[in-house]
Amino acid sequence: MKQVLQSLKNGETSLAEVPVPKCSKGYLLIETSKTLVSTGTERMLVEFGKAGWLGKARQQPEKVKDVLDKIKTDGLYPTIEAVFNKLEQPLPLGYCNIGRVIEIGEDVTGFEIGDRVISNGKHAEVVTVPVNLCAKVPDTVSDEDAAFTVLASIALQGIRLIKPTLGEAIVVTGLGLVGLLTVQLLRANGCRVLGLDYDKKKLELAHSFGAEVVDLTSHRDPVTFAQSFSRSRGVDAVIITAATQSNKPVHQAAQMCRQRGRVVLVGVAGLELSREEFFKKELKFQVSASYGPGRYDPNYEEKGNDYPIGYVRWTEQRNFEAVLDMMAANALSVSQIISHRFRIHEAIKAYNLVFSDKPSLGILLEYPGLDKGKISKTISFESLNLTSKTNPKRVEKSQKSGAVQVSFIGCGNYANSVLIPSFKSAGATLLTAASISGDTSAHSAKKFKFSYASTDIDSLFTDPANDALVISTRHNSHAKYISQGLLNNKSIFVEKPLCITLKELKKIEVDLKSTYENNVDNPILMVGFNRRFSPHCKKIKSLLAKESHPKSFIFTVNAGFIPSNHWIQDKELGGGRIIGECCHFIDLIRHLADSPITSFDKNTMNCPDNDTITINLKFKDGSIGTIHYFANGSKAFPKERLEIFSSGKILQLDNFRKLRGFNWPGFKKMDLWRQDKGQAACTKEFLSAVKEKSPSPVPISEIFEVARVTIQLSENF
């Protein structure tokens, strides 16, 4: 299918061929009829991409500091690679979609196949959208009108924040699409409206919708006019729907308002507020969050947990419904603000228009509809750059070379920046890049020359061409995919953690035992505990092999802050940071101690996510280990330091770049010109084991031991 993507690296907008997305639990799969180009938001995204490095830095100064800190701790080249990989990820454009439901995800109620629905889906022939971001379209509302619903909901949420009453005088600054929709909704609410803009065509439209207007290109002072408009009382409220870096809209809004007036920012404006202006009038200033309550809340948007209507009357979804009701009642009209229509294959022309000097307003993209028999969840590498789809011919076992054929499940940032390059450089044949999102799998397939891009994850487990599967998805899916792979006799490389619950761990153990009992050539199960394969840790291991006395390990991890709403902090999705990240450090100390863990405990600092902790480990040979995992440090400090004390000698490893030996006979230091955490060596050993049918490079007993200890530490808060 076709989808509009944008590169944040160079600003290039492209019409890509990608697989149809997978319909997940709590989602709807929608075949698109029309989408609306949000000229304000989408123009800003493209302009950011087109900006040079200096321009990008000026727009995101906080990111520059992070980059400089990373250079200090990790080195120049790893930092450059990380930045480039982040910017290379394609950004799907669009968020105003109308279409028909063609598939319903698990646990979804209230929708049926064939329903016409609006959503914040992308510019793509088929989209998958969480159910709370969808709403049914009344029969009397056309597809063209419905395409404006999400944009109108942004306007509606700004209006809800000012809480207008019948007869109030309200100024709308900026008469683009959102501004013109705001004017109509305010008029329908019984308000007197004054519209401000520089564009005569937009001013005429606002006037036709019942607003008085001020042309900002004229010499008329908008503040003076607002005073007259408000009968010298000051306007009751100002809604700013403009997109500018200037502070003038907010400054003028404060001057226009009456005592205790309200100012709501829906668009973008400079925010250097004058305390004097807001203080004297006791003005209320608020920034509107998109479509309404629920926006950016993963519990509402991703998990489908609705807010009780008795406590939150107007959510995102209910705002969508309210807008559609206004359209059905002919209280909101959009036909006059449609300026252009393009077929989806002409999408680039539409974006060229946005950046041209030619006037435009509402730009609709139209979709001809897909042949249901040709909706493909897997497309070949050759067809990724073509406008027509092909039915890929599967690679058979007999056609393969001696290289191990590997498919990836999950094509996120870590997979693209570390795992896939490591497997490719180690000599693997990259077969299929798969994810639930077609654009991410297509990006990985094109970048690394996989044979296929797919969203049909289940097919990978039964495909005889796959020798091994790499799982790099969210943590809550690891156990399911591991078991599915083992029962289909596939070798599995899973990016940590193995799983997130003891129940999942038990099932994996049972499935592995069953697989080994029923197969001659046993598949390999390996967790990506790469640090034990790093050059420094191999050196440490060789030095410690000569030590018979117990050792003391101190691992300090400057983990950094992760917000509470990040998926890794979610116990159901990520398992929390002990399971998701501390497992790395528990495994490394277990590997270097070369002795089973006999007891463990932890101390947790009183913080919201319990992610600043000290873990204590004791080993069978008498060794002890302490992991200081701190989320309250500074990024300017190195992330990881390991210190080992043994029989009057000390080893100190700093951030996998420098190793020092103190009083260690025959060893003083080992420095690398760049950081090496062992990812390349880890993948190379896994591929060798698969090819030679040898045991997992990380012993399965240690994988299960570390998983069990990590989960128990996490559960025992």
Image: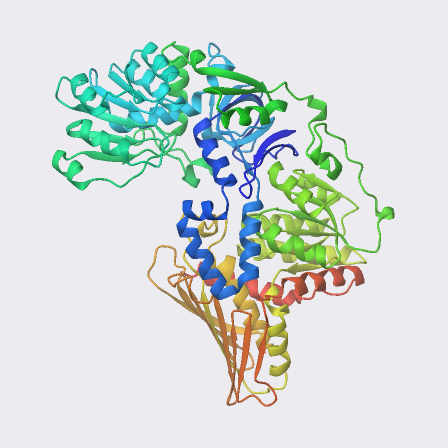
Who is closer to the viewer here, 461 or 709? 461
- Give how far across and how far down residue 447 sits, in percent: 67, 45
Can I make out residue 514 in this image?
no
Residue 390 image offset from top left, x and y in percent: 76, 30
Residue 404 % position (x, y): 78, 55
Instruction: Tell me where residue 560 appears, x and y as whole percent.
Output: 42, 59
- Identify the residue at image location x=70%, y=34%: 385
Residue 414 to residue 659: above or below: above
Number of numbered discs visible in the structure rendering: 0
The quadrant of the image that shows the N terminus is: top right
Using residue 614 as the reference point, say whether residue 250 is left or right of it.
Answer: left
Residue 711, placed above or below residue 148: below
Q: In this view, does 367 lie to the left or right of 431?
A: left
Q: Quadrant of the C terminus?
A: bottom left
Question: Which color scheme does this rendered protein use?
Answer: rainbow
| Viewer can see residue 639 | yes
Q: In which quarter of the image is residue 173?
A: top left
Image-quadrant location for residue 444:
top right
Q: Is residue 213 above or below residue 560?
A: above
The correct choice, above or below, for 544 with respect to 655 in the image is below
- Name the residue furthest front: 219
Q: Which residue is drawn at 47% across and 71% down?
A: 600
Which residue reaches farthest right?
A: 398
Q: In this view, does 715 lie to the left or right of 705?
A: left
